[in-house]
Image: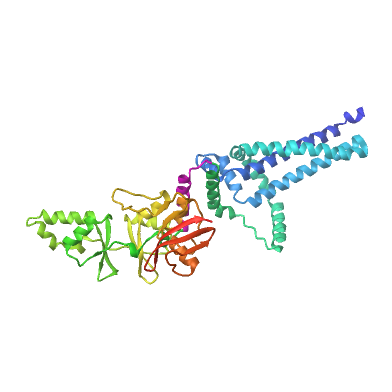
């Protein structure tokens, strides 16, 4: 026995097993660190000049290649160390050494090569990822041919079951990850509802169109361009809006947009002129003061339209459909309200709020209120795929224009029609079933 203990080959085998366990621990920790690290935090560090973070970003772009190389190296290290341990214990203890080698190596691999490094890596993933990125990049380059062969075999097997792999799919999942993180943060109390709604509103702009939030043409306040200038001045001053469309003949024929400040400047020039007096206002050329109308299609994404408003340095657009017919009106404020919520000032008319909650828990809703605004206010989840307004949802589900007093139940809620004017539902009462 003493001869065996002084055998150099025995200690070389023990040293090799220890080295392989260290290698396995490094690879296990690297896998956890690189997969758990936030790419956003790594990008922030890379922008500050951290080369390790930049390398980590590059090697995590192809997660399939990264995982393939690490798992290949890790499995070789674990299997080789287990084989050496079996040979070592068999030499020392005979046939009983196989069971003991299995027990010892399972314990060592589990504690020192798996749980310990992975626990450390998941505790400080970004820090660990920046440190291991360099060696892992070399490993990927060395094992690239073998990994490519393994990848081809794996993809071939998966394709037999109809599964298609895409190493770039994480690029498309960033939006879902952020949305999920916000929802989780709100449920755990890390985000207030208002903060969550603002962030989600900004994220959703690219997925929503002008048609969903525009003011319908039936609600647009317009001025007849052929009316006397003094009457137009009175209407502009009486309106709570700064910009008003001018029409000629019929309301569909928009010929300009009058800005209250431009009109007042023109009035001042007219009145303060050499022969100016209040009567001179009747000779004011309104169309010379008005600006040309800006028309946009109803299918324009909100983020694109916001950029266009900023580029044009204008806040007001008229929405048309594919046939060029007027559909509604959109302002920059309407888009901003999708992010920050309702914006009101001292000139806004809000005599009757579109949403009120009764003592019994029911909601009294203006039929023209958008489903998105209603969901944000109540934290409900009424679908808005087929309709933009609450009234539109009821009409779509009922397949008719309901009469006052009719009650419907769908999507887990009870809808009661409280008011109807012509073909329009004006008021509803909603409560969960």
Residue at the outermost left position: 275
The x and y percentages for residue 144 are 68, 51
| Residue 202 in view here | no
Image quadrant in which you'd find residue 97: top right
Image quadrant in which you'd find residue 37: top right
Q: Residue at x 64, y 58 (%)?
A: 165
Q: Residue at x 56, y 53 (%)?
A: 173
Instruction: Left or right? Give the position of 32 relative to 39.
Output: right
Colour scheme in use: rainbow
The x and y percentages for residue 326 are 34, 67
The x and y percentages for residue 145 are 70, 53
Camera-side residue: 369 or 429? 429
> Which part of the image, by quadrant, shows the C terminus?
bottom right
Camera-side residue: 366 or 192? 366
Camera-side residue: 49 or 374? 374
Marks counted in the figure total: 0
Is 252 above or below relative to 76? below
- Please tell me whether residue 110 belongs to the stretch shown in magenta: no
The x and y percentages for residue 62 are 62, 51
Q: Main secondary structure of the magenta part?
A: helix
Is 198 above or below relative to 208? above
Instruction: Left or right? Give the position of 297 relative to 282.
Output: right
Instruction: Left or right? Give the position of 135 relative to 108.
Output: left
Look at the image and give the residue range highlighted in magenta: 189-207
- Please tell me whether residue 193 belongs to the stretch shown in magenta: yes
| Residue 280 in view here | yes
> Which part of the image, by quadrant, shows the N terminus?
top right
């Amino acid at each position: 026995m003493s001869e065996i203990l002084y055998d150099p080959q025995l200690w070389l085998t023990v040293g090799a097993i220890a080295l392989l366990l260290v290698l396995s621990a490094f690879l296990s920790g690297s896998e956890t660190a690189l997969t758990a690290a936030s790419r956003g935090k790594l990008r922030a560090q890379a922008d500050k000049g951290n080369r390790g973070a930049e390398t980590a970003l590059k090697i995590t772009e192809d997660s399939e290649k990264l995982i393939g190389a690490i798992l290949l190296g890790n499995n070789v290290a674990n299997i080789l160390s287990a084989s050496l341990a079996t040979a070592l214990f068999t030499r020392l203890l005979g046939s009983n050494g196989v069971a003991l080698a299995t027990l010892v190596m399972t314990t060592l691999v589990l504690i020192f090569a798996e749980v310990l490094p992975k626990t450390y890596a998941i505790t400080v993933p970004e820090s660990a990822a920046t440190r291991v990125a360099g060696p892992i990049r070399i490993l990927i380059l060395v094992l690239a041919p073998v990994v490519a062969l393994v990848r081809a075999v794996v993809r071939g097997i998966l394709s037999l079951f109809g599964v298609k792999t895409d190493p770039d799919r994480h690029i498309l999942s960033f939006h879902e990850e952020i949305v999920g993180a916000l929802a989780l943060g709100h449920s755990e109390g890390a985000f207030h509802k208002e903060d969550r709604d603002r962030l989600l509103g900004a994220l959703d702009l690219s997925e929503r169109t002008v048609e969903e939030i525009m003011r319908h043409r039936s609600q647009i306040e317009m001025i007849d361009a052929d009316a006397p200038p003094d009457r137009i001045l009175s209407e502009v001053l009486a309106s709570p809006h700064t910009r008003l469309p001018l029409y000629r003949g019929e309301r569909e024929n928009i010929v300009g947009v009058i800005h209250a400040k431009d009109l007042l400047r023109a009035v001042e020039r007219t009145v303060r002129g050499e022969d100016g007096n209040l009567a001179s206002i009747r000779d004011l050329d309104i169309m010379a003061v008005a600006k040309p109308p800006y028309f946009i299609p109803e299918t324009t994404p909100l983020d694109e339209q916001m950029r266009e408003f900023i580029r044009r340095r204008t806040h007001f657009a008229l929405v048309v459909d594919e046939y060029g017919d007027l559909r509604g009106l959109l302002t920059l404020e309407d888009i901003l309200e999708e992010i920050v919520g309702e914006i009101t000032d001292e000139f806004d008319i809000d005599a009757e709020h579109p949403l009120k909650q009764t003592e019994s828990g029911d909601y009294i809703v203006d039929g023209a209120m958008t489903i998105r605004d209603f969901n944000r206010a109540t934290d409900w989840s009424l679908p808005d795929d087929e309709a933009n307004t609450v009234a539109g949802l009821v009409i779509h589900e009922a397949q008719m224009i309901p009469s006052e007093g009719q009650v419907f139940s769908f999507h887990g809620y009870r809808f009661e029609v409280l008011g109807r004017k012509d073909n329009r539902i004006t008021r509803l009462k909603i409560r969960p079933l």
